[in-house]
Amino acid sequence: MTAQPTPVTPAPSPRRASRVRRGDGRAALRYLIPAGVVLLALLVYPIYQLVVISLYDYGQPQASGAAPLVFLGLDNYAKLLSDPRFWDVLVTTIVFAGVCVAGTVLVGTALAVLAGRARRIPRTLLFLAALGAWATPTIAGSYVWLFLFDQDFGLVNEVFAGLGFGGMHGHSWTFDRYSAFGLVAGEIIWCSFPFVMVTMYAGITAIPREVVEAASLDGASARRTATSVLLPILRPILTIATIQSIIWDFKVFTQIYVMTNGGGVAGQNLVLNVYAYQKAFAGEEYGLGAAIGVVMTVLLLLITALYVRAQRGVR
């Protein structure tokens, strides 16, 4: 028998390939338009209104229509930036958010590694416990932590006293500035680490076993494999988890407000969100509160951009 030649399919011409790419781009654009409209309605317009309010003398009389709006331009921002209290709260917020983000990422990643090495039943129990912490409403979780660390009836003080630390009887965890921040940070990490844990676990289980086995055959230690093989693969997932944690922890409000009774003794536990609330609603300076919101938005965008750029430079 004579072998039949295999027909050769001609490669598409550059002009045809360009038309195909344009068609795919238009189809993708049609699918993205609904999501873009929703984002414009739920994100861009409120930010626009926030910026507009920050440019006016906008208090309760203006909000109720009893007084006309007075355009101030950048006066609210000048007043804010010349206030030493604002800079103190800003530095406190950055440090506090950094501690919470670092703790969340470290705890979540460590438990993701542990889950990857655990057997099925312990891993299932670990995920159920983590998801239970994640699903707990923020206010409920804050009050649970307050009850656990209550100075009179808290379980934590009773345990410490039982271990021989007699000074823990009647100890108040929310009176001192740093212990109050530590208490709030613990609650934030407790309710935030499950997101990092689930995300990192999904990334770890998606890594082919052949990659780890090849590194082991090359003589790489467990530490070398983790830092030089696994971490570069997991870096995009870790970047997403870290950015989400930065956004969540930088604008924390509920935990601080509930657990420190509105910002602590003499406002020693204020963060930017609670500070903005006090200025806008307690002080009826909505324009100044909006200016704080604009500053927070800009800072979050800058921090996120710098972090993403730093991660790209590591690759």
Image (cartoon, grey):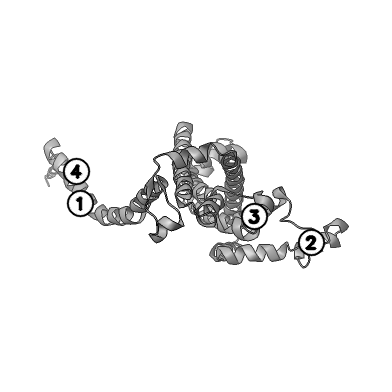
Q: Nearer the viewer, mark 4 or mark 1?
A: 1
| Element class at badge 2 | helix
| Element class at badge 4 | helix
Front residue (pair 230, 198)? 198
Note whether 38 is above or below 90 in the view shown.
below
Mark 3 to mark 2 CA distance (whole Å): 17 Å
Asked if the residue under mark 2 is in contact with the one under mark 3, i.e. CB atoms within 8 Å, the reply is no
In the picture of the structure, the residue carrying the numbered disc 1 is 27
Asked if the residue under mark 1 is in contact with the one under mark 4, i.e. CB atoms within 8 Å, the reply is no
In the picture of the structure, the residue carrying the numbered disc 2 is 157
**Which label was assigned to residue 21?**
4
**Outermost residue to the top:** 313
Q: Position of residue 314 (x, y in %)?
A: 48, 32
Q: Nearer the viewer, mark 4 or mark 3?
A: 3
| Element class at badge 3 | helix
Q: Earlier in the sequence, mark 2 or mark 4?
A: 4
In the picture of the structure, the residue carrying the numbered disc 3 is 184
Q: Earlier in the sequence, mark 3 or mark 1?
A: 1
Residue type for callout 1: Ala
